[in-house]
Image (spheres, rainbow, N blue to C red):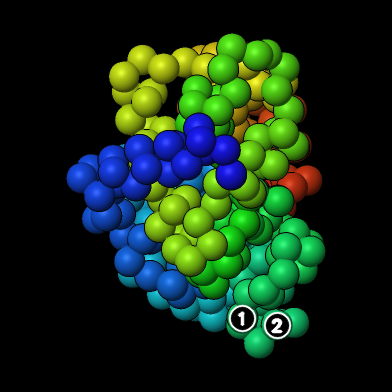
Amino acid sequence: MTGAQRALRRRVWSYYRRHGRHDLPWRKTRNPYRVLVSEVMLQQTQVGRVVPAYRAFIRRFPTVQRLARAPLRDVLVLWQGLGYNRRARALHRTAQILVAKHHGRLPRTEQELCVLPGVGVYTARAILTFAFDLPTALVETNIRTVLLHELVGERRNVTDGELETLAAVVVHTRRPREWQWALMDYGAYLKAQGVRVNAQSKHYAKQSTFKNSTREVRGAIVRALVHSRYLSEKDLLHTVKAAPAHVRAQLAALQKEGLIRHNGYWSL
């Protein structure tokens, strides 16, 4: 480990001891199912919006068995406000697979975890770290900020593979859960101080505008069906403020994905 890497460790631990977000509910559990729920919710959704949704979700579905038995409609109702409803569908399907094929337990290898719906490499490694306390090379938006700002300098087109190598070098093998939390919190602090370096990443992509987007239309359709169990296409075209052709296209896409159904009327 280089001097810069050792200095980074000291700064990160120092910040975490004084300002770490120790009250986040998913940091108070080692339950693999609850870690899974939190990680899926945190995909592309800000922490502040996830906290109340996570608490409500765990109250309603405290175990993987309860989630697996629940109708998808109940899951989507609780998912409102988080966006990207296909994540809820994937989490529900994963719960069913875990109960049917794994006795309700999450696998303990990255390869097995990545087979589950909605679980990619990052989510698999996060589960291994936060549920099983195994050291992994995690790279998410805040950790990427730390590594680029502190160790890379001004170089551009940095790949996540390069950042994973750095993350593996600086990982704290005796306290991997806390170390990753500390990195995330330090990265959030850097961003709050105006550090904007993620554009140096080769994989950086500016998020598209939400207004009038496919995401907005899909969310509006699901939200309408949460509030009204059954709606005709005419009702939906009136409720969802978008071009009729766009609404119809997303109805077909959501039906194909298994998020909504059509039997004379549209429903969840």
Q: Position of residue 223 (x, y in %)?
A: 47, 40
Residue that appears at 38% across and 70% down: 29
For the residue marked with disc 2, what is the amino acid?
His
Label 1: element kind: loop
Badge number at residue 193: none
The residue that mark 1 highlights is: 105
Determine the residue positioned at 33% across, 30% down. 189
Residue located at (36% from left, 61% from top): 27
Residue at horizontal 63 percent and vertical 49 percent from the top:
168
Whether the residues at callouts 1 and 2 have beta carbons within 8 Å, the answer is yes
Q: Position of residue 130 (x, y in %)?
A: 49, 63
Q: Quadrant of residue 190?
A: top left
Quadrant housing residue 233: top right
Residue nearer the viewer, 233 or 165 = 165
The answer to which image quadrant residue 175 occupies is bottom left
Q: Is residue 235 left or right of residue 256?
A: left
Around disc 2, counting alpha carbons within 10 Å, would you say few (fewer than 14), some (14 to 19), or many (20 or more)?
few
Q: Quadrant of the N terminus?
A: top right
Asked if 212 appears above or below 54 in the picture, the reply is above
Which of the two residues, 77 or 44, is positioned nearer the viewer here? 44
Looking at this rendering, what residue extends furthest in the bottom direction? 103
Whether residue 145 is visible = no
State whether residue 253 is above or below residue 138.
above
Whole-percent x and y of residue 208?
Answer: 59, 16
109 vs 18, nearest the viewer: 18
Q: Amino acid at mark 1?
A: Arg
Q: Return the residue at label 2.
A: 102
Label 1: few (<14), some (14–19) or many (≥20) C-alpha neighbours in 10 Å: some
